[in-house]
Amino acid sequence: VTVQRIHHVGVAVTDLDESIAMYLSAFGAELVHRAVNEKEGLEAAFIRTGTGEVELMHATRDDSPVGKFVARRGPGLHHVAYAVTDIEAALAQARASGLELIDATPRPGMHGGRIAFVHPKSMGGVLTELVET
Ligand code: CO
């Protein structure tokens, strides 16, 4: 089996501080990591909820991918990420299954490990991320 578990769910938000506070107070969740990715125009906060995480994503620029997503669809569910132990093997399997990859090769993720995205049109409209753990 290539996929181990759901690693995190990405949620686009308009106010990162407010969203973090909501998850912490409403769910007793824990903030594990917060970082800015200038290249992606993104600030993200990872909230631990049991064994999985929620990635709260806030655009730092309106023309960034998350900025455009929020302008088009409003805040809300953005992607689902699956943990894999061998991302090259997972990408090869996805490609062999006919999925359209956004990232043909893995790139560094904000969690430290390598990631790659699969196009939502290959996955029933769900932007899908693979995270190597
Ligand atoms: Co993610």
Image (cartoon, rainbow, N blue to C red):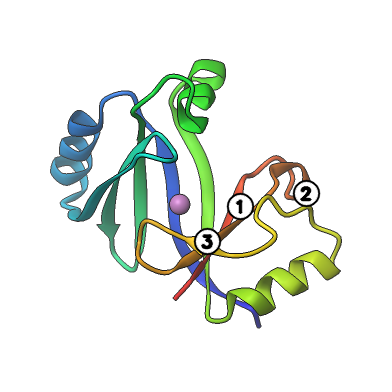
Asked whether 30 or 85 is in front, the reply is 85
Asked whether 90 or 79 is in front, the reply is 90
Q: Nearer the viewer, mark 3 or mark 1?
A: 3
Q: Tell whether label 2 touches label 3 (CB within 8 Å).
A: no
Gap in angstroms between the C-alphas marked 3 and 2: 20 Å
Residue lying at the far front in this picture: please name it.
39
Q: Label 3 belongs to which residue?
A: 107
Local crowd at mark 1 within 10 Å, few (<14), some, or many (≥20)?
A: many
Q: Name the N-terminal-most of marks 3 and 2.
A: 3
Which element type, helix, strand or loop, lies under badge 2? helix
Asked whether 51 or 73 is in front, the reply is 73
Is 29 placed above or below 95 here?
above
Residue appearing at x 33%, y 28% in the figure: 60
Indicate the amino acid at tag 1.
Thr
Gap in angstroms between the C-alphas marked 3 and 1: 15 Å
Residue 73 coordinates in the image, percent (x, y): 55, 21
The answer as to whether callout 1 falls within 8 Å of ligand 1 is: no
Q: Tell whether label 1 touches label 2 (CB within 8 Å).
A: yes
The answer as to whether callout 2 falls within 8 Å of ligand 1 is: no
Indicate the amino acid at tag 3.
Arg
Asked whether 56 or 132 is in front, the reply is 132
Q: Quadrant of the C terminus?
A: bottom left
Indicate the amino acid at tag 2.
Ser
Q: Tell whether label 1 touches label 3 (CB within 8 Å).
A: no
Which element type, helix, strand or loop, lies under badge 1? strand
Q: Label 2 belongs to which residue?
A: 122
Residue 44 coordinates in the image, percent (x, y): 32, 43
Q: Label 1 belongs to which residue?
A: 128
Residue appearing at x 80%, y 57% in the figure: 99
Q: Name the N-terminal-most of marks 3 and 1.
A: 3
